[in-house]
Image (cartoon, coloured by chain):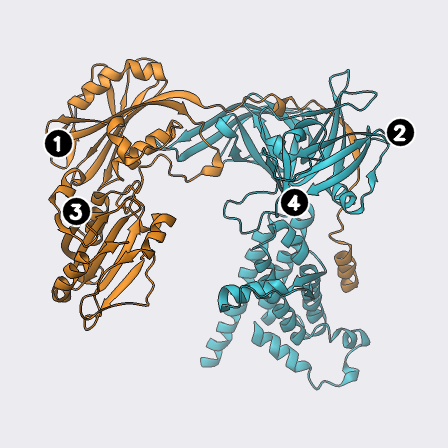
Amino acid sequence: MPLVALVALGFGSGCQEKAKISSYTNAPDANLEAGPAAEPTPARTLAAAVYRPDATWFFKLMGDPEAVEAQKKAFDDLVSTLKATGANLEWKLPSGWTETKGQGLRYATFKLPGDSGLEVAVNRFEGVAGSLLANVNRWRGELSLEDLKEAELPQAVSDRKVNDLTVHVVNLAGKRKPRQGMGGMGGMSGMPPMARNQPPVGQPGQVTSGAKDAAEKLAYKLPGGWRESDKKVMFAARVLEVDGVPSVKVTLSPLKPEGNSVADNVNRWRGQMALTPEDPTTLEKGLAREKIAGGEEALLVDISGKGPTGPQRLLGAIVRRPEALWFVKLTGDPSEVAKVREGFSELVRTLKFN
Amino acid sequence: MDNALHSDASADVGAPRGAYPTWKRLLRPLASLRLTVVLFALSLILVFYGTLAQKEQDVWDVVNEYFWSWWVLIPNKLTLLFLQVFFNASPDASWGLGFWFPGGKLLFWALLLNLVAAHMVRFRFSWGRSGILLIHAGLVMMMAGEFVTREFAEENVMTLVQGGKSSFLEITRFNELAFTCPRPDGQVDTVVIPQEILASATRSGEIIENEALPCRVKVLQYASNCDLLEKFPDGFENPATEGEGKTLALKAMPPVSGVDPEQRVNMPGAYVQLLDKSSGQPLGTWLVSTLFQLTRPVRVQEVKLGEGGPWKVALRNRRSYRPYTITLDKFTHDVYPGTNTPLNFQSDVRLEDPSLGIDRVSVIKMNEPMRHAGETFYQHQALAGDSGSVLQVVRNPGWTLPYLSCAVVSLGMLVHFGATLMRYMRRQA
């Protein structure tokens, strides 16, 4: 009998009530029909960025345009007191401001006087927290402003020399987008791009279709014993191998020029070799240069450090082209890299973009 | 466990026919261990294809088609899809048709019958086998839990704007075409046509008529998921003659897949032609979509239907009215300092239920739900611009069964393996 009951229950289950037209009387739906529309609100941002060899610092004041404008002089005064002390920065607060220690990603918070609720957020990120262009565009994005191009950056940023520091200051006005709902949980929109030791904005993933097309026009002369490999390396347009030194890997990769800088990428390589990043404002000036067959200048990098499996050496050449930033990268065991160093230089010299 | 089953099964082999009553002999094929293995194998295959199907189908469609059905027609293209992804089958290949396969419901009941029959035919109660009995009882309880959840559990949402109140829940997986008309006493007369009838009328071309409806309805097009285009595509012949449809075009979209990384939901839409209730004369064609319900204020379309009114028409999530009212006094959205990363979502609400004499305030935030009348209210989402809150309202009378069944299975395993260990130790002694 239990079986019969089970079968009867089983066949009778899942029979949903047949859909039918129904009518009823209910309270008016005023709740949904009267909701306020979500509109962007006017806002202004005063921000300062300081790139140090070991860390990147951000100071940001954002809020109602008039309230922020009223604090502009005090913010400028704060910037003029910034001073490096070892790995950290020091400052002197304007009158009436109070400082509280930050938590999580925030290093400190400066509460401003009055009932405006304004505060300056101070964030410190290890290493290079994205290029200046990427960070300025992040702040612009918060105010619904269009991204700037590299060439437009100098007009938007005022560089101030303060106690041997270079402080990049921006003053932006726009409309603040309403915060999104929980659907966006975990979003990192408030974070600098690639903060916290992540590779900076020059990730190979940002190869544009234009740069991919450019790979078709890439030409060079292979040194003796060098050959093109059938191996696929993600994002690389070409992979080269050298006979007799299998540990050496050579890739030629294009990155999109917007938002990528030479300094960011050299520091990314330094990070891969367990080296601390260098000051991005002076790094490029210190690189050696070599004229290539195409007429452009290649910036040369030679770094020795520690790779995942032991000592490693990296030879790099960077060529700035309108359609892409080209990277030629050779890595391997230091003793083997030394054997192919001449070949690498020869390869770079013959580079040409048709 | 398998050994125990085997020993029981083999004990029956060779037993004289007359040793069993007729009902036992009849039940023996149903109690077969081979049948158990076959059913498990079929279940594995069903889960495999049900998982593949979610690449292109909505997860709830898959649940209904594959797991809560007696039979399912599995399209051959799913097998091809698998071969293309994992075995480099030609991307140009095209496999039509499909094959019928036992659905989840059939396998569920077959397994249950198999288990019960096995106990009736093969198992004899003894303390030594009490562990096995407990494990099987736990499994049956687990199956019963799924049954209760499927049949009786509800998972709805309640949307509240700041300062607003609501006494209905929205069943987001279903929708309905609603005609509403205000009454002199401040209440609203509502007539709703569920989506099943809308979809069926689209296929058949039938005109929907009902005494309660203020007009007749002809569904020209019904899309289970759609987008609204502000620019009409080239060659688009607009069926809409009234309302929002005069400036927006409906574009039917494929249903949201069960593996959609953004976990979107279907937003249905339709072109509905309304006809005079008595004469049958066309009154105009309207574009309706649940997408209009997302705007604040909600876009409402008025329709002129001769006498009475003014009536409004909307395609909206199916509603379920409750005897209680919830008011959102305050909604709070905190972020981690210096970022937009959410730290806390919180709804301060007032609950009024005259039927139970309840009037109280409560705080609902992440991991801290409110409970009332068998329903649990979780903080679910925030409306754009933090203008309000969306609560998820869950009722599941079988929510304790999975916990109980796991406890019973664990106890059964403990007893069974403990008894086995004891027997082993006694033999060694």
Q: From the image, state whether disc 4 or disc 3 is nearer to you.
A: 3
Where, quadrant-wise, is the N terminus of chain A in this rendering? bottom right
Which residue is labeled 4 in the image? B153
Q: Which chain letter goes with mark 2? A: B
Q: Earlier in the sequence, mark 2 or mark 4?
A: 4
Badge 4 local density, few (<14 within 10 Å), some, or many (20+)?
some
**In the image, are marks 4 and 3 on the same chain?**
no
Q: Earlier in the sequence, mark 3 or mark 1?
A: 1
Which chain comes out orange in the rendered image?
Answer: A
A96 on left or right of A28: left
Rendering colour (chain B):
cyan
Which residue is labeled 2 in the image? B279
Which residue is labeled 1 in the image? A84
Determine the image quadrant of residue A81: top left
- The answer to whether mark 2 and mark 1 are in CB contact below 8 A is no
Q: Residue at x 62, y 31 (%)?
A: B293
**Which percent across, then down, holds residue A340?**
15, 65
Which residue is labeled 3 in the image? A276
Q: From the image, state whether disc 1 or disc 4 is nearer to you.
A: 1
Q: Residue at x 28, y 18 (%)?
A: A112
What is the distance, in whole Å, between disc 3 and disc 1 at their CAs?
Answer: 18 Å
Determine the image quadrant of residue B282: top right
**Which percent across, then down, holds residue B100?**
70, 65
Where, quadrant-wise, is the C terminus of chain A in this rendering? bottom left
Badge 1 local density, few (<14 within 10 Å), some, or many (20+)?
some
Instruction: Answer yes or no: is residue A105 visible.
Output: no
Q: Amino acid at mark 4?
A: Ala
B55 on left or right of A175: right
Q: From the image, state whether disc 2 or disc 1 is nearer to you.
A: 2
**Which percent across, then down, holds residue B86?**
49, 66
Q: Amino acid at mark 2?
A: Ser
